[in-house]
Amino acid sequence: MPAIAADDLSADPWTFVVKVIGTAGTTRYTYQDWVEAKKGISHSRVYTAYQETITNEDRYFVDVCLKGGQPLSTLEDAIVAQKVVEAVEKSIAEGITVTIE
């Protein structure tokens, strides 16, 4: 009988995985890559997803917001990113190639 509320303690759990496949290589991350030996709310261990992202976000906050460093991106970067998302959505919906201006 399958366990519905059981911990997936396998080496490569299917319940959470991030995989990036690029032209210069591939990487993957599961929550098993950062496991703390303390009881969590619903698991026998604490699993921290995206640990390096959390660490880098904290470092960025300290360096930029508290020490006056330079931001990684600008409002213009956010506008371009939004245009890309909208172009992708239009491309998928209409089955066309969309040029971003």
Image (cartoon, rainbow, N blue to C red):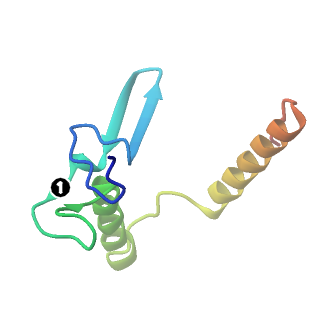
Q: Residues within 10 Å of mark 1 (few under 14, many from 20)?
A: few
Seen from the viewer's position, the closer of residues 66 and 84 is: 84
Among all residues in the image, which is located at the extreme bottom? 66
Horizontal arrangement in the rendering, residue 67 relative to residue 83 (left or right): left
Among all residues in the image, which is located at the extreme left? 37
Q: Which residue is mark 1?
A: 35
In the rendered image, residue 72, in percent from the top left (x then y), is placed at 47, 57
In the rendered image, residue 29, in percent from the top left (x then y), is placed at 32, 41
Q: Give the amino acid type for the residue marked by disc 1 in the picture.
A: Val
Residue depicted at 72% across the width and 48% down the height: 85
Seen from the viewer's position, the closer of residues 80 and 94 is: 94
Residue depicted at 27% across the width and 60% down the height: 48
Is 99 placed above or below 60 here?
above
Residue depicted at 45% across the width and 28% down the height: 21
| Secondary structure beneath label 1 | strand
Horizontal arrangement in the rendering, residue 19 relative to residue 40 (left or right): right
Residue depicted at 32% across the width and 62% down the height: 54
Horizontal arrangement in the rendering, residue 40 relative to residue 95 (left or right): left
Is 6 placed above or below 16 here?
below
